[in-house]
Amino acid sequence: MYQMKNKLQVKIPGKLYVAGEYAVVESGHTAILTAVNRYITLTLEDSERNELWIPHYENPVSWPVGGELKPDGEHWTFTAEAINIATTFLKSEGIELTPVKMVIETELIDQSGAKYGLGSSAAATVAVINALMTKFYPEISMLKKFKLAALSHLVVQGNGSCGDIASCMYGGWIAYTTFDQEWVKHRLAYKSLEWFMKEPWPMLQIETLEEPVPTFSVGWTGTPVSTGKLVSQIHAFKQEDSKNYQHFLTRNNEIMKQIIQAFHTKDEELLYSAIKENRRILQELGTKAGVNIETSLLKELADSAENMGGAGKSSGSGGGDCGIAFSKTKELAEKLVNEWEKLGIKHLPFHTGRVQITE
């Protein structure tokens, strides 16, 4: 029933948040993401023993067939947990495992090793799940692969919307609505993996979207950011001022509906106005919470896009890293990129990323 394959390669795109940041960490709230054509590549082949090779480390780690990989050092944790959860699932399905060698390479950081904020740990998790499922259980559904990767990520990180997991798993443009995180967390300790695979997760929605009509551009401000720190500062604000925080969530919901409608109807003006409004509520959230979501360079990035008739904003947690923009024409996008370069913003020439599996 399960055809064994000698060698396969999985390419998983990085991700960028386009809209809905901060709100998406709350259950039942939505964000828009795009996958980008910078990849983590995982090559899997039959081997005499289980081996995992990751970038920047000279020696591989090994683990027993059907057994647990116990990572030595935190740089292995995401991939190790993905291997362990995939192993548990495959064994529960009665699938016989054989030893494999996995080699991971990445384009999600620049030459100096600085992360672009493209979700490298999520992409690595998704790469492992995709590779092992393609090898041992090719008919598994996309949703089940998402659940495996999401559970794996939650075990390591303890929190997070898993929007990055969805983006890396599905590729392209998506609208992602976060599952009920408390529902999942409360059951992690006593429900089986098979149960999680079969049960619908409350509130979870993943909708694939067509690429937008306007030209999409990405600029990097050159400052890697600790997303966890910024999110925890916003969480503190939520405790202190729940009324204003709830207002932010309500407005975000309305804006995400407008953006999804703009994608469906190819309404460019609606898209620009909704992106501008999303930028405004994030600025307001940052000001009220005392968190620098839109840095001076991200402000210039977005302002220059608006000045040319389009729209722009911070991407992800803000505070540095990337900003995004939509332009009415390719010519205006080129003009915008030239303006960014003058401001010291590096244009990242990304296109839409797709998951690629070759056997």
Image (spheres, grey):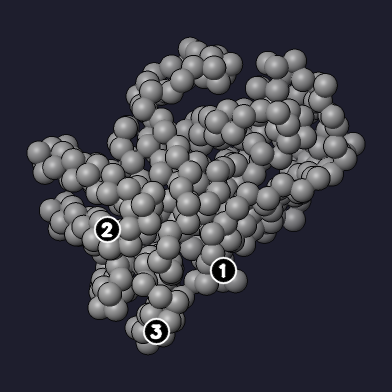
Q: Which mark is residue 335?
A: 3
Amino acid carrying label 3: it is Lys
Please identify the residue farthest to the front as the structure is shown.
265
Q: Nearer the viewer, mark 2 or mark 3?
A: 2
Q: Give residue 219's position: percent from left, percent from top.
A: 42, 71
Left or right relative to 149: residue 43: right
Instruction: Name the residue that disc number 1 marks.
Output: 110
Amino acid carrying label 1: it is Asp
Q: Quadrant of the C terminus?
A: top right
Q: Residue at x 48, y 12 (%)?
A: 190
Q: Are marks 2 and 3 in contact (CB under 8 Å)?
A: no
Closer to us: 186 or 70: 186
Where on the picture, by quarter, is residue 170? top right
Q: Residue at x 76, y 38 (%)?
A: 62
Residue 340 seen in render = no
Instruction: Name the residue that disc number 2 marks.
Output: 270
Q: Could you classify mark 3 by the number of other residues whose Cα lies within 10 Å: few (under 14), some (14-19), or many (20 or more)?
A: some
Q: Earlier in the sequence, mark 1 or mark 2?
A: 1
Closer to us: 50 or 348: 348
Amino acid carrying label 2: it is Leu
Q: Give residue 346's position: percent from left, percent from top.
A: 45, 77
Of helix, strand and loop, which one carries label 2?
helix
Residue 146 seen in render = yes
Q: Nearer the viewer, mark 1 or mark 2?
A: 2
Q: Could you classify mark 2 by the number of other residues whose Cα lies within 10 Å: few (under 14), some (14-19), or many (20 or more)?
A: some
Where on the picture, by quarter, is residue 213? bottom left
Closer to us: 79 or 16: 16
Q: Which mark is residue 99?
A: none
Q: Give residue 253's position: percent from left, percent from top.
A: 24, 42
Q: Earlier in the sequence, mark 3 or mark 1?
A: 1
Left or right relative to 47: residue 283: left
